[in-house]
Image (cartoon, rainbow, N blue to C red):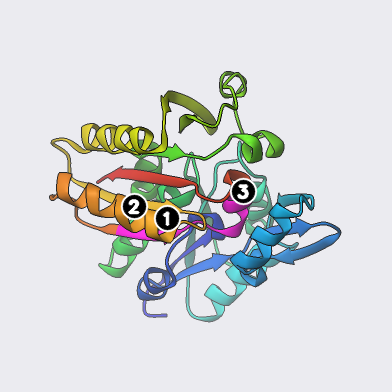
Amino acid sequence: MSSRVAVVTDSTASLPARLADRFNIITVPMQLKIGSELIDEAYVPTDRLLQAMDAQIPITTQPPAPDAFFWAYQDAWAKGAETIVSVHVTPKLSPATDAAKAAAAKSRVPVFIVDSHSSGMTLGFAALAAARIVQTGGNVQHARTVAEERGRNASVLIYVNTLHYLRQAGRVSAAAKLFGDALSVKPLLTVVNGEVEPFDKVVGRERALGKLVDKAVALAYGRKVDIAVEHFAAEKEGHELLQMLQQRIPHARDVVLTQVSAAIGANVGPGALAVTVSPF
């Protein structure tokens, strides 16, 4: 490790492996309980998760295995890290941050925990921002501050085919629970203060995605931004959405297409799409 500051995150960041590798970001996997089996999500192929969802096998998400963060911090220390910035999913969506704090208390080096205020590429871009600071010689306080700002200032816009999976996981606000389940009505969601909230509902999938793009363009207008399109088992649709955004937000710096982690996929359901707009 060339830097004396390491960056750690959890797998809900949904970072493409090429970016995590390029910026030396250590990713600790969340866990899924599928039926009675508890397994690191890194070992859950999409096909297996989809089959379990189709068969209505109970699926729950859990924080990383006990001591997983501790050993990630130990590994960073062994490679030369003197401090660690650990950026995570908001505690309102997962207790992963509590696990990271417990591990930090036992770490050989100081660990600074950052709440991303969300998950997915809001978290991913926050971790990347910290890693960029580190790679250009910045100190731990600068990396921590930038990660906090990126998480706090980003916006995520979410399209789901149905609210069934989010309701089942208890991940929607009281307001979102009031949305009906008519197949033609597509809810559009965002994350506010760590809670999944509705911001619109549109009749028809194409109109819903058009509304998603319009909202993303408005959020990006006049700002320096990174953009991510996230999907679960909808890569073709993700590519199409990415192309629409690139045409209308040509000034975006980083434009990323990624499948969300299995832990997020289990909560949003197949066909879900999201756009993250992250100002810098």
Q: Secondary structure at mark 1?
A: helix
User: Can you tell which quarter of the image residue 209 is in?
Assistant: top left
| Spot occupied by residue 31 in the image (x, y as percentages of width and height) | 70, 60
First reached walking from the N terminus: tag 1 or tag 3: 3
Look at label 1 and name its amino acid: Gly
Q: Is residue 107 left or right of residue 56?
A: left
Q: Quick check: marks 2 and 1 in contact, CB under 8 Å? A: yes
First reached walking from the N terminus: tag 2 or tag 1: 1
User: Can you tell which quarter of the image residue 38 is in?
Assistant: bottom right
| Spot occupied by residue 9 in the image (x, y as percentages of width and height) | 51, 59
Q: Is residue 264 magenta?
A: yes
Distance CA(mark 1)–CA(mark 3): 15 Å
Distance CA(mark 2)–CA(mark 1): 9 Å
Look at label 3 and name its amino acid: Thr
Query: Residue 140: in sight, yes or no?
Result: no
Q: Which mark is residue 97?
A: 3
Q: Secondary structure at mark 2?
A: strand
Q: Secondary structure at mark 3?
A: helix
* Residue stretch in magenta: 256-266
| Spot occupied by residue 278 in the image (x, y as percentages of width and height) | 31, 45
Look at label 2 and name its amino acid: Ala
Q: Residue at x 50, y 40 (%)?
A: 160
Distance CA(mark 3)–CA(mark 2): 23 Å
Q: Which mark is residue 124?
A: 1
**Mark 3 Cα-neighbour bin, 10 Å: few <14, some 14–19, many ≥20:** many
Task: Return the residue at label 2.
Answer: 228
First reached walking from the N terminus: tag 3 or tag 2: 3
